[in-house]
Image (cartoon, rainbow, N blue to C red):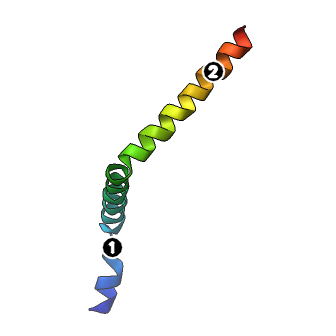
Amino acid sequence: MLGKLKKNNKGMGTVEIILIIVVLIGLVLIFKNQIMEITKTIFEKIAADSSAILA
């Protein structure tokens, strides 16, 4: 009986991937505002630096 349980782990990878995706989506929803602020700051710095290069 234990031999059958050890060999039958085909769905294990799928469940783990789904759990990881759920956790990542949860983290994005929790930290949405902070992520948006950081992204906005980064793109503002990129725009400022690229305009300095072109000038």
Who is closer to the viewer here, 26 or 13?
26
What is the quadrant of residue 22 in the picture?
bottom left
Left or right of 54 in this view: 34? left
Task: State the SS at label 1.
Answer: loop
* C-alpha span from label 1 to label 2: 53 Å
What is the quadrant of residue 54 in the picture?
top right
Q: Is residue 4 above or below residue 25?
A: below
- Residue shown at 31%/91% (left/top)? 2
Task: Read off the residue under disc 1.
Answer: 9
Type of amino acid at the residue the image marks with label 1: Asn
**Percent x, y of residue 4:** 29, 84
Closest to the camera, between mark 1 and mark 2, is 2
**Percent x, y of residue 1:** 26, 92
Task: State the SS at label 2.
Answer: helix
Quadrant where the image shows the C terminus: top right
Q: Is residue 34 above or below residue 19?
A: above
Type of amino acid at the residue the image marks with label 2: Ala
Q: Are marks 1 and 2 in contact (CB under 8 Å)?
A: no
Query: Which circle's residue, 1 or 2, is located before the other in the chain?
Result: 1
- Residue shown at 66%/14% (left/top)? 51
Q: Is residue 45 above or below residue 14?
A: above
**Residue 39 tag number:** none
- Residue shown at 37%/50% (left/top)? 28
Task: Read off the residue under disc 2.
Answer: 48
Who is closer to the viewer here, 30 or 1?
30
**Percent x, y of residue 42:** 56, 33
Left or right of 43 in this view: 21? left
